[in-house]
Structure formats: structure tokens, C-alpha cells
Image (tube, rainbow, N blue to C red):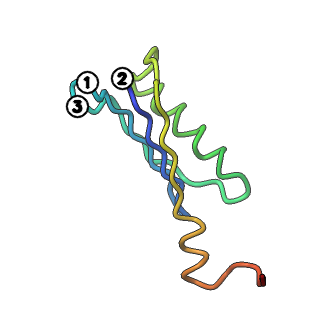
Amino acid sequence: MTTLGIDIGGTFTDLLLLDETSGKLIGRAKVSTTPTDPSQGAMNGVVELTASGAQGVAISFVCHATTIITNALLQHRTARGGL
């Protein structure tokens, strides 16, 4: 089983590709986050993983995380809302 982990942060997007059977790290990438479209940074990371020799790997699980909203909450940069 191969897992792709993606963490989209405010500045960088980090990706790890892990073979969970052997525990071996297949590849990693760190690319700039695209603030206007965070998914673009994730796709740029996948392209970088592929270029670094991780092409042809069958990914069976994707784990996505983001620190963008956590940072926005901590810095009080969210829209005001009420219940």
C-alpha cells in the first residue's frame, strides 16, 4: 500500500510518498503554496515527485491536511460569524 501525504501550509506545501508495507520513503517534495488556489501547489508537488523518480507508483491512499485555516484562526483573520 502506498500513501501520499499532503500538507498545504500558508507558505509551503509538503508532500510525502510512503510505501507502508516496507516503511520506505519513496519520495518527498516541498513547493510554494499557491494562495489563490491551494490545490495548484499540491499538484505542483505531485509533478515534482514524479520528476524525482516516483512515476509509475500506484497510490492507494491520500492523506490531506492543511494549516491554512489553523493559522487564520490563530491570527484572527477569518470572517466574523455568528450562530
> Earlier along the polypeptide chain: callout 2 or callout 1?
2
The one of 31 and 73 positioned closer to us in this rendering? 73
Q: Which residue is mark 2?
A: 1
The one of 22 and 13 positioned closer to us in this rendering? 22
Q: Which amino acid type is marked by label 2?
A: Met
Residue drawn at (54%, 31%) of the image = 47
Residue drawn at (37%, 39%) of the image = 28
Viewed as shown, does residue 80 lie left or right of 30? right
Q: Dividing the image into 4 quarters, which one contains the C terminus?
A: bottom right
Q: Secondary structure at mark 3?
A: loop
Task: Return the mark for residue 33.
Answer: none
> Earlier along the polypeptide chain: callout 3 or callout 2?
2
- Estimate the x, y position of residue 25 in percent, counting from the top left: 28, 33
Q: Quick one: label 3, few (<14), some, or many (20+) residues within 10 Å?
A: few
Residue drawn at (38%, 26%) of the image = 2
Circles 2, 1 touching at the beta carbon (< 8 Å)? yes
Q: Residue furthest front?
A: 83
Q: Which residue is mark 1?
A: 21
Circles 3, 1 touching at the beta carbon (< 8 Å)? yes
Q: Which amino acid type is marked by label 3?
A: Gly
Q: Secondary structure at mark 1?
A: loop
Q: Quadrant of residue 19?
A: top left
Looking at the image, is 46 positioned above or below residue 79? above
- Estimate the x, y position of residue 80 in percent, counting from the top left: 77, 84
Q: CA distance from mark 3 to mark 1?
A: 6 Å
